[in-house]
Image (spheres, helix red, strand yellow):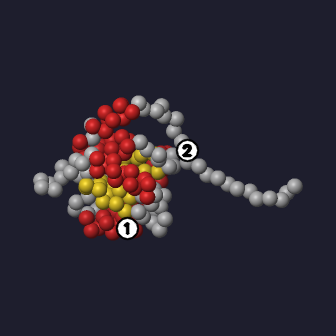
Amino acid sequence: PGLGTTFRVLLPVGRLDKPEPEDQADGELAATAGISGRTILAVDDEEIVLSLMTRVLESAGAIVLTADNGQSAVERFRDNEDDIDCVVLDLTMPEMDGEETYRELRRIRDDVRVVISSGYAEEEVTRRFEGHNVGEFISKPFRPNELLNAVTRVCRRTEPPPAGR
């Protein structure tokens, strides 16, 4: 008695969503033509998530740039700031977390449009970004149509890309 190890495990809050029928999700994907030709910077340190985001966004006609950490995202954004229409930004990353990355992106271009993706509850993320102009929030794990719908809504708030892009 009194000996042993104590572990503390913190898990993000899950959602109790009703699963969507496959054909309904596909129908929603077709409604996202608003991102065709847009340039999206996808940022996530998890390779499988970054790969999924890239495939989903490219399937909707977007041009996708990727970064696997915050510092890399800031560099990619700085090099392409005039072309990037939206950033999909993971909140929890090594080296530079999503909050710091967001602040750096805003220093480069104040009107940057961002979709925050996180396993944390939306209330926690909203509190952390209170007073900032974050476009959308999607909770991990997200379905492809949730990503596309969030990016589409954010892109619709910006001017269309110049002709020839």
Is residue 94 depicted above or below 64 in this figure?
below
Q: Position of residue 20 (x, y in %)?
A: 42, 32
Is residue 83 depicted above or below 11 in this figure?
below
Give, as a three-letter code, the residue at label 1. Ser
Residue 114 visible in the picture? no
Q: Which mark is residue 61?
A: none
Quarter of the rendering occupied by the N terminus: bottom right
| Residue at point 41%, 30% (across, down) | 21
Q: Position of residue 165 (x, y in %)?
A: 16, 56
Residue 37 visible in the picture? yes
The earlier-in-sequence mark between 1 and 2 is 2
Q: What residue does disc 2 label? A: 13
Decide if residue 30 is on the left or right side of residue 140. left
Decide if residue 37 is on the left or right side of residue 7. left
Give, as a three-letter code, the residue at label 2. Val
Residue 87: which quarter of the image? bottom left
Q: Tell which tag, 1 or 2, sits nearer the viewer.
A: 1
Q: Who is closer to the viewer here, 101 or 5? A: 5
Near mark 2 (Cα within 10 A), the count class, few <14, some 14-19 or many ≥20, is: few
| Residue at point 23%, 52% (across, down) | 38
Q: What residue does disc 1 label? A: 72
Near mark 1 (Cα within 10 A), the count class, few <14, some 14-19 or many ≥20, is: some
| Residue at point 31%, 39% (across, down) | 29
For the residues labelled 1 and 2, the Cα–Cα distance comes to 29 Å
Q: How many marks?
A: 2
| Residue at point 54%, 42% (across, down) | 14
Is residue 32 depicted above or below 54 in this figure?
above
